[in-house]
Amino acid sequence: MAGSLSAVEGDVRGAVALRGCGFAALWGGLGGVELETDYSHVRGLDEWGLGASLSWQRRWGGSSVYPYLALGGGWRQEWLGSFAEARFPLGAALGARALAGERAVVRVEYRVRRVTHDPVADFTEQQAWLGISLLFRNRARAEGPGGGERGGD
């Protein structure tokens, strides 16, 4: 779960997001499936989105760091007053998870999405994430985020 509150020149933006991921052994590393939902509000604009991504990661040498690549997309509904518009973000992410213990992972991610179906013109958005993920059902500590065969963050 994530949340943010920012103010730029008097415009206040609030946002919340919830992400969940599961892992399984795949091609000598870990494959991941992640689902997320988010909501944000700034002035009269409300946005709600659903997204999914597929990732692949592998331990970097003998460290506890797992760099990963993810491909994903989703659906975003926007409301501005009585007007509603759906948009579809599609793109990729590059990141790393570093085990910070048996039940926690420090995560950094850079995400690029092409947002399609905009009434004026398609556009590209970029996001940088830094956060801590909690691990549930981490069966094998040494195998990485989610514990090899099954797990989640």
Image (cartoon, grey):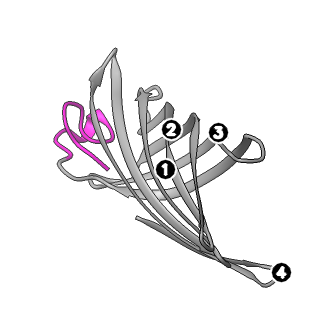
Could you say which is closer to the camera, residue 83 or residue 72? 83
Which amino acid, by three-letter code, is at mark 1?
Arg
Look at the numbered discs 4 and 3 and tell me whether their residues touch, using CB distance below 8 Å: no
Going from N to C along the chain, the mark reached first, 2 or 3, is: 2
Residue 2 in the figure: left or right of residue 24 = right
Going from N to C along the chain, the mark reached first, 4 or 2, is: 4
Which amino acid, by three-letter code, is at mark 2?
Gly
Between the residue at mark 2 and the residue at mark 1, the CA separation in whole angstroms equals 20 Å
**Residue 91 forms part of the magenta stretch:** no
Q: Is residue 99 above or below residue 17?
A: above
Q: Secondary structure at mark 3?
A: strand
Between marks 2 and 1 in the image, the one whose residue lies nearer the viewer: 2
Going from N to C along the chain, the mark reached first, 1 or 4, is: 4
**Residue 145 forms part of the magenta stretch:** yes
Between marks 3 and 1 in the image, the one whose residue lies nearer the viewer: 3
Residue on which disc 4 sits: 9
- Residue numbers of the magenta segment: 138-153
Look at the numbered discs 2 and 1 and tell me whether their residues touch, using CB distance below 8 Å: no
Residue on which disc 3 sits: 116
Could you say which is closer to the camera, residue 101 or residue 55? 55
Between the residue at mark 4 and the residue at mark 2, the CA separation in whole angstroms equals 31 Å
Between marks 2 and 3 in the image, the one whose residue lies nearer the viewer: 3
Residue 22 in the figure: left or right of residue 34 = left
The local crowd at label 3, few if under 14, some if 14 to 19, many if 20 or more residues have their Cα within 10 Å, is some
Between the residue at mark 3 and the residue at mark 1, the CA separation in whole angstroms equals 27 Å
Between the residue at mark 4 and the residue at mark 3, the CA separation in whole angstroms equals 28 Å
